Image (cartoon, grey):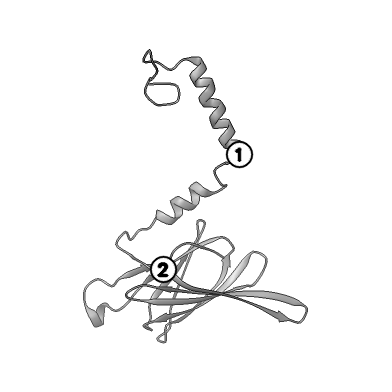
Amino acid sequence: MSELGGPDISAEGRIDEADLAALRAVRELYEMTDPVPAGLIERIKFAVDLEDLDAEVARVCEEHRLVGVRSTEATETRTITFDCSVLTVMISIRPITDETVRIDGWLAPAGEHRVECRSPDAKRETMADPQGRFVVEDVPHGLLQMVIRLSWQEVHGGTPPVVVTPSIMV
């Protein structure tokens, strides 16, 4: 094995110092001109780190931004709708402070489903009311993924499905 972790390859069956120097120069060039984005590895690990691998993944089907003015401050509210075969999730994201947002959400079909907002550093859980409405306050800005655990076992039988949204920035 070579110093770079790969097999020894060259015309003579080995990588020499000139080859290693060229490979180092190429690596340095890529690190300077096209570096791996900060936090990419952590975001990838976060996106795939789910307890429930048997979850249905919702897709973003609509997103809107609305800028409102209250007194002298302008605030931007985002509305995102996620959809899959068993559930539609609509959320409204409104900044509360420079560090946090409030998420108001609605689920269809409505029901008292468990809603979890996951970020790389925290997890906040709440229950939707019988009409499918929920609120999660003090959600930190950054990467967010929602996990909704449907509570229809008593009606439909079997294991209730779990719905996961794609990760979004809030």
Residue 96 placement, left or right of 84: right
Question: How many residues crowd around disc 2 within 10 Å: few (fewer than 14), some, or many (20 or more)?
Answer: some
Q: Where 12 sits versus 3, above or below?
A: above
Q: Which residue is mark 1?
A: 33
- How far across and down, in percent of the image, does residue 26 sit? 54, 30
Q: Quadrant of residue 29?
A: top right
Residue 94 placement, left or right of 80: right
Residue 14 placement, left or right of 70: left
Quadrant for the C terminus, please.
bottom right
Give the foreground label among 2 and 1: 1
- How far across and down, in percent of the image, does residue 41 sit? 49, 47
- How far across and down, in percent of the image, does residue 39 sit? 54, 49
> What is the spatial separation of the Cα atoms under label 2 and label 1, in whole angstroms?
33 Å
What amino acid does circle 2 point to?
A: Arg
Question: How many residues crowd around disc 1 within 10 Å: few (fewer than 14), some, or many (20 or more)?
Answer: few
Residue positioned 43% across, 56% down in the render:
47
What amino acid does circle 1 point to?
A: Thr
Quadrant for the N terminus, please.
top left
Q: Secondary structure at mark 1?
A: helix
